[in-house]
Amino acid sequence: MEVVTQHYFHSSLTGMGYVVLGAWLIQATVGVTLLVSWARHAHGQSAGLVWTHAVAMVGFLVPWSAFVVTGAALWAWVGFGVLLVFIGFGDATMVRRARTVLGETNPGLRDYVPAALVALSGRLGRRTTFHMLFSAVVFFGALAVAIGATVAAAAS
C-alpha cells in the first residue's frame, strides 16, 4: 500500500510539474510578444534588464524539464532558484516603465507598489498586466512543487 501511495504522490507531483511547465509556456509566449514590442519601440531602453530577464526565464526550462523527467527535488529547487533570482529583472523593467508613465524620476523600492498599480490600471497594456499577474502562477506553483518534491523525498 505504501508503494502505491508513494507512486500516486510522485505522479501527482510530476503532474503538477507539467502544470507549472504549461503555465511557464503561456507566460513565455506572452513574454516573447512583449520582447518583440520592446525591440520595435523601446530603442534599447532597459536593454540589460530586459535581455537578462528573458534569457534567464528561458533558463528555467532546463532544470524544470529535468525535474519533470527525473522527479528529483534538486532540479525543482534549481528551477525555482532561477525564477527567484531573475524575476526581479522583469520587475525592475516594469518599475522603470511605470515611472515613465507617471513622469517620476526618483528610483527606489518604494516604486514597486505604485508600478504594480499602474500596471493593474491598464496603463502599461493588457499583455504587461497579464504577464505581471500570471508570473505569480509560475513562481508560486514552482515553489509548491519544489516543497512537495522535498517532502516526498524525505518521506521515502
Image (spheres, rainbow, N blue to C red):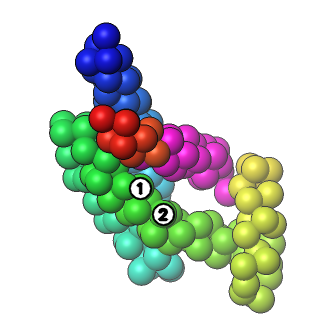
Question: Label 2 sits on what residue type?
Answer: Leu
Residue neighbourhood size for the residue with mark 2, other residues' Cα within 10 Å, grouped as few (<14), some (14–19), many (≥20): few
Residue placed most toward the observer, 13 or 89: 13
Q: Which mark is residue 137?
A: none
Magenta segment boundaries in residue numbering? 124-146
Q: Which picture quadrant has residue 35? A: bottom left
Provide the major secondary structure of the magenta segment.
helix
Where residue 156 appears, as percent x and y from the top left, is 30, 35
Residue shown at 38%/73% (left/top)? 52
Residue 35: in sight, yes or no? Answer: no
Q: Quadrant of residue 48?
A: bottom left
The extreme bottom residue here reads 106
Mark 1 neighbour class, 10 Å CA radius: few under 14, some 14 to 19, many 20 or more: many
Q: Which SS class for mark 2?
A: helix
Label placed on residue 80: 1
Q: Position of residue 7 (x, y in %)?
A: 28, 20
Please check the rendered image and state whether residue 127 is part of the magenta-colored stretch, yes or no. yes
Residue 30 vs residue 129: left or right?
Answer: left
Direction from residue 56 to residue 104 in the image, left or right: right
User: Vertical placement of 156 versus 74: above or below?
Assistant: above
Residue at left offset 27%, top offset 52%: 75
Question: Magenta stretch containing residue 102, yes or no?
Answer: no
Q: Report the amino acid beneath label 1.
A: Phe
Q: Are marks 2 and 1 in contact (CB under 8 Å)?
A: yes
Image quadrant holding the N terminus, namely top left
6 on left or right of 80: left
Task: Give the Cα distance between marks 2 and 1.
Answer: 6 Å
Q: Residue 124 versus residue 20: which sits nearer the camera?
A: 20
Q: Residue at x 63, y 46 (%)?
A: 133
Q: Secondary structure at mark 1?
A: helix
Residue ID for mark 2: 84
